[in-house]
Amino acid sequence: GYVVTSVAVISHGSSFAEMIGVVGNSGEMHEAMLFGVDPALRIAFLYVPTLPVSPAVNLRRERWTSGSFAVIVGNSSGVSPAVALSTVAGRRDVDGFWQLSGPAAPGMSGAPVYDSDGRLGGLLVGEVATYGAVSNRPLPAVMVSSERLRESINKHVIRSSERGRPWLGITVRPRMESDGSVHVFVSDVVSNSPAQQAGILAGDVLLSVEGTSIGYVS
């Protein structure tokens, strides 16, 4: 299945994490690979071959209004699931994000935001429990609306798949060699995938493709 989250969850500065793990509903750990990024919305799409597809959720389709209740469900300092109630302050003109009335707790970045009817209304991104250099106060949390999320998913996931984006069926992570070079380490191979049919095994290190040397690709 696919997972949508905030870029801040899987990155540090300008670099992405070498290994990404996703915890399932039963507490099991799954290894994920980065499928795509929408830099304008600060969201990332992960592909998790071993993660079951979750039931569909109802989306909020109308525009948010100032004063609307917003329910955040995420991970607050190790408490999961943690629920926080906030209100929508308004829409920011500079980037189109919706600003909430207060900061979100640490761990809430990438958390879903629901409206008072239980519909998914957005995803927390950006300023989450950080501190401004001038005011030294927590900056307010901001979210991407469900409408913009749907548009981004259609563009970066669904249309990409429809265009026939190459798929091998492997989960990879970078491997640093003693000489400083980086190669692709295969950590998992999906059953009945093109990679398995070609004989690729978990633990293999991919050095080249059709004679062309490759480094780690994200």
Image (cartoon, rainbow, N blue to C red):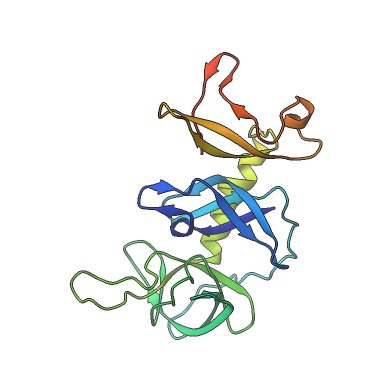
Place of residue 120 in the rendered image (x, y in percent of width and height, measured from the top left): 60, 72
Place of residue 194 in the rendered image (x, y in percent of width and height, measured from the top left): 75, 30
Which residue corresponds to the image point at 68% horizontal and 33% vertical from the top-left? Answer: 168
**Residue at the farthest left position:** 134
Which residue corresponds to the image point at 40% horizontal and 29% vertical from the top-left? Answer: 180
Place of residue 114 in the rendered image (x, y in percent of width and height, measured from the top left): 58, 77
Which residue corresponds to the image point at 63% horizontal and 50% vertical from the top-left? Answer: 31
Residue 51: quadrant of the picture: bottom right
**Residue at the farthest front position:** 178
In the depicted view, which residue is nearer to us: 8 or 39?
Answer: 8
Compared across the picture, whether 15 is left or right of 50 comes to left
Compared across the picture, whether 15 is left or right of 31 comes to left
Place of residue 171 in the rendered image (x, y in percent of width and height, measured from the top left): 64, 41
* Above or below for 74 versus 4: below
In the depicted view, which residue is nearer to us: 200 or 1?
Answer: 200
Which residue corresponds to the image point at 35% horizontal and 52% vertical from the top-left? Answer: 13
* Above or below for 184 versus 126: above
**Count of labels shown?**
0
**Residue at the farthest right position:** 192
* Above or below for 202 versus 95: above
Compared across the picture, whether 101 is left or right of 62 comes to left
Compared across the picture, whether 163 is left or right of 138 comes to right
